[in-house]
Image (cartoon, rainbow, N blue to C red):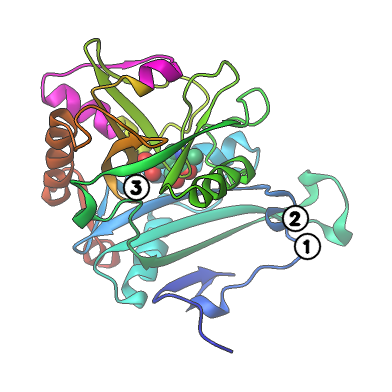
């Protein structure tokens, strides 16, 4: 069979394995019910960026799902760093996952299941490649409502992605690069793997409701402060989105990425805006700052 796996490495059932050998049971609740949580950190030039923030969110997510992770923070760090080292990657996308696991005899009570932790590292992936920064993202504004927080707590990073995947398909079929979903009140929510920021006369804003509390989202709020700018967490109506002077997306998979078109209509000048540029620059500068990074080698010492 053709090898469809990227360069990479995994840890599962207590051992490091090749990516192609990392497998879970068909009866795992994570697979059958999307009953799982995960987190994704990244490594840039051999250094994890804000790893403890990702681990904090992962541990909190497992607690909120009433299956607190049994791994100790330092052991998890060594597992993640081990995956990166084994995959021989300088720039990596590093994912940790905990599923509900399997229940004996496939009984329906989730409390009977034994949670299952695993991790993998693959090459760093971009929602918008750096060479396309000036061009920015051409995004499709869907009328799909993101699963509301009254159904699934969005602060638990989760695999309830059917709405997001439908949005991606709608966007690709119309020739756009990715999608934005709305919330129950028809305000903007988020996209497949990213949060959204708008810049206009009133300042910088990002949705306050119904979205994952992205690590990059919080980083941008902090970096804006460093630049003397305030970010307002508040609802963003569709009209506000369309009339923004600048828009950008934030994600571990690519950082700070300008959105220059919404459903074919130019945003601002149709180029990456000034505020987006300043925050983007500072974001990447922090990747060499020892206060924000932790090297793979140091974790493994
Ligand atoms: N929103 C969703 C639904 C996501 O899945 C992600 C990341 O995968 C984000 C936002 C961005 O979060 P972060 O900045 O922590 O990568």
**Which secondary structure lies at badge 2?**
helix
Q: Which residue is mark 2?
A: 32
User: Residue 58 placed where, x, y %?
Assistant: 48, 44
Crowd band around label 2 with a 10 angstrom C-alpha radius: few (<14), some (14–19), many (20+): few
Q: Give the Cα separation between the discs numbered 1 and 2.
A: 7 Å
Q: Is residue 206 left or right of residue 71?
A: left
Tell me the quadrant of ligand 1. Answer: top left
Q: Is mark 3 within 8 Å of ligand 1?
A: yes
Query: Residue 252, labelled with which disc?
Result: 3
Crowd band around label 1 with a 10 angstrom C-alpha radius: few (<14), some (14–19), many (20+): some
Residue 147 counted in the magenta span: no
Q: Give the Cα separation between the discs numbered 1 and 3.
A: 30 Å
Res. 79 visible in picture: yes
Mark in the foreground, 1 or 2: 2
| Camera-nearest residue between 65 and 41 | 41
Mark 2 or mark 3: name the one nearer the start of the chain.
2
Q: Are marks 1 and 3 in contact (CB under 8 Å)?
A: no
Q: Which residue is mark 1?
A: 27
């Amino acid at each position: 069979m053709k090898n469809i796996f990227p360069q990479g490495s995994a840890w599962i059932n207590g051992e490091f394995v090749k990516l192609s050998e990392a497998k879970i049971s068909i009866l795992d609740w994570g697979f059958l019910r999307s009953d799982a949580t995960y987190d994704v950190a990244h490594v840039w030039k051999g250094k994890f960026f804000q790893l403890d923030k990702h681990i904090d969110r992962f541990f909190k997510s497992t607690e909120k799902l009433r299956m607190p992770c049994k791994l100790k923070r330092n052991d998890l760090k060594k597992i993640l760093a081990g995956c990166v080292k084994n995959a021989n990657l300088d720039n990596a996308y590093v994912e940790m996952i905990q599923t509900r696991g399997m229940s004996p005899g496939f009984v329906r009570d989730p409390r009977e299941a034994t949670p299952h932790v695993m991790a993998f590292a693959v090459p760093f992936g971009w929602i918008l490649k750096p060479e396309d920064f000036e061009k920015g993202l051409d995004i499709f504004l869907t009328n799909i409502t993101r699963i509301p927080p009254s159904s699934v707590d969005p602060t638990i990073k989760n695999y309830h992605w059917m709405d997001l995947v439908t949005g991606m398909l709608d966007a690709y079929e119309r020739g756009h690069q990715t999608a934005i979903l709305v919330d129950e009140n028809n305000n903007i929510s988020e996209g497949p793997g990213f949060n959204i920021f708008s810049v206009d006369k009133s300042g910088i804003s990002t949705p306050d409701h119904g979205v994952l509390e992205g690590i990059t989202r919080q980083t941008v709020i902090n970096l804006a402060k460093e630049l003397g700018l305030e970010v307002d967490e508040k609802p963003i109506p569709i009209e506000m989105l369309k009339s923004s002077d600048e828009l950008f997306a934030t994600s571990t998979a690519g950082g700070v990425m300008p959105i220059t078109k919404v459903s074919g209509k130019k945003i601002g000048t149709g180029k990456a805006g000034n505020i987006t540029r300043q925050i983007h620059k500072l974001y990447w500068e922090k990747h060499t700052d020892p206060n924000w990074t932790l090297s793979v080698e140091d974790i493994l010492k």
